[in-house]
Image (cartoon, grey):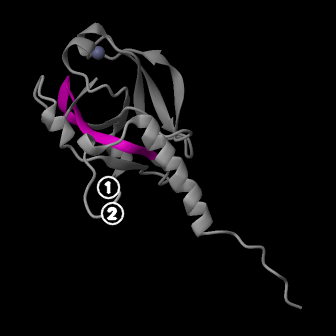
Amino acid sequence: MPLPENMPYNQTQTFFHKPVVKLECRHCMNILCWRGMRAILLADTSIELYSTDLPPPNAVEMSGDDYCTSNCACHIRDSVCARCGNQVGYHVTLPCRNCMDSCNNGHFWMFHAVECKEVERMDDSGQKHLIWGKLPPTHEDLQKLKEKLSKNRSIFPLYPVECIR
Ligand SMILES: [Zn+2]
Ligand SMILES: [Zn+2]
């Protein structure tokens, strides 16, 4: 499991000041994540990742079976973009004791930095970058996202076109 970038142990303050990012699939631009955090893999700090607590519904799908890596005993499973099917990250299905004891930010969904494009998320005013300390809880955020998507539909309605003869 990853450690948020630059986050010292037991110092979650840094975590609250980290920017919230949206992630797009690099292959098809599908939105994979609305609440991502830049992170590094604890076992190999040269590997850049993003993590999230919950991807939006229907953004990613699980692929194949659980497996373990040589890093630790976490059970993980690959995740693929729900639109184009490219592998974009993995989900920790069963965290190992070591990771739970030492280094977790509560995020069980990871995205490989090379597979996605990061877009900084703005706050409600649209002026400032949103940070994790200001991010609403997951269920509120998802509700907001749903409202936003349904609003978008009413901003761009498909009017029936009259045929002119
Ligand atoms: Zn682990
Ligand atoms: Zn895709």
Q: Splitting the image into 4 quarters, where does residue 69 fall?
A: top left
- Asked if residue 83 lies left or right of residue 94, the reply is right
- Asked if residue 111 lies left or right of residue 9, the reply is right
- Residue 33 within the magenta-colored segment of the rendering: yes
- Asked whether the beta carbons under mark 2 and mark 1 sit within 8 Å of each other, the answer is yes
Q: Residue 138, percent across and down?
A: 41, 36
**Amino acid type shown at disc 2:** Gly
User: Who is closer to the viewer here, 150 or 97?
Assistant: 150
Q: Residue 26, percent across and down?
A: 42, 51
Q: Splitting the image into 4 quarters, where does residue 53 fall?
A: top left
Q: Residue at x 32, y 62 (%)?
A: 125
Over which residues does the magenta segment extend? 32-48
- Residue 119 within the magenta-colored segment of the rendering: no
Q: Is residue 53 visible in this depiction of the protein?
A: yes
User: Who is closer to the viewer here, 12 or 104?
Assistant: 12
Q: Is residue 5 visible in this depiction of the protein?
A: no
